[in-house]
Image: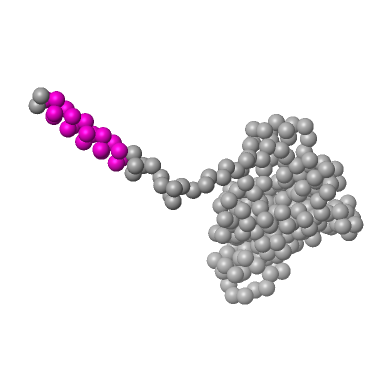
Amino acid sequence: MKNFKKYVAISVIALAISSCITDKNQPTTEDKEEVVEQTAIKSILTAEEQAGMTPDEIIGRLKKGNENFVSNNLTQRDHSSQRREAMIGQYPKAIVLSCVDSRVPVEDVFDLGIGDIFVARVAGNIENADIVGSMEFATAVAGSKLVIVMGHSACGAVKHAIDKTDAASMEMSALQNLLNEIQPSVTITEKNGEVSSKNTEFLNNVIYNNATKTVEDIRIASPKMASLEKEGKIKIVAAVYNMETGKVDFI
């Protein structure tokens, strides 16, 4: 009898403890939050959508996408589905010329997915014949409405151009040629203090001028794109990405 009573007492205590734990782990009505699942985007940009957008509208969409990036609110995408759909064709709305810097994730910066934009990369985001040819393909052939030359803060290539790094003496003649292409942007930048990459204000001004100069050089190098721009069919613009804030400022 004593054992039975002891068993009953232990059972009651165990049940009470279990009830307390369950109640503690169960959220109350006040604690419950409505969970809204975001549906992943499966489709990619179509020819009709591309044709229906203006260059200014595209800039607006990219600015909105950049706001999403800055606020860490990137769009959810079904990349497997997009990858398969992209096999049918591509209709990107823009081409972005960016630096090779690994800290500048172009698609993420504008909250974009597969098939949304063309991306060209070269240190210092300068143009050359191959880059301009790629831009002509993107615009005149593939229908993109916007060309963006996007520099970025703390650009290593621009820093070395400012400091006149002698890459040739280190058996890097190709790199020296690239730095030489940036040098005119250093020359045209107003000197406000020390001409050094340590002068942050001067560095930022050179980065700005380098992006805008590249835009002008593209217009000169491609009469076709210059003509499309005059007709209002495309825009060629410069921008600068701030690596600290994630914000893109269109110039």
Q: Nearer the viewer, residue 224 or 92?
A: 92
Whether 166 is drawn above or below 203: the answer is above
The percent coordinates of residue 136 (x first, y second) are 83, 47
Residue 105 sits inside the magenta stretch? no
> Which residue does the image show at 70% across and 54% down from the upper left?
62
The percent coordinates of residue 39 (x first, y second) are 62, 40
Relative placement, left or right, of 207 versus 5 is right
* Quarter of the figure that contains the N terminus: top left
Task: Label the magenta part by its dominant secondary structure.
Answer: helix
* Quarter of the figure that contains the C terminus: bottom right
> Which residue does the image show at 59% across and 75% down from the upper left?
193
Q: Which residues make up the magenta segment?
A: 3-21
- Furthest toward the left, the residue is 2
User: How many discs appear?
Assistant: 0
Q: Is residue 219 visible?
A: yes
Q: Is residue 101 visible?
A: no
Q: Nearer the viewer, residue 179 or 167?
A: 179
- Furthest toward the front, the residue is 1
Relative placement, left or right, of 55 versus 26 is right
The percent coordinates of residue 182 (x first, y second) are 69, 59
> Which residue does the image show at 78% across and 35% down from the upper left?
89
The percent coordinates of residue 144 (x first, y second) are 80, 47
What colour scheme was applied to this rendering of the protein? one colour
Relative placement, left or right, of 217 versus 27 is right
Residue 247 location, quadrant? bottom right
> Which residue does the image show at 60% across and 43% down from the upper left?
38
Q: Nearer the viewer, residue 129 or 18?
A: 18
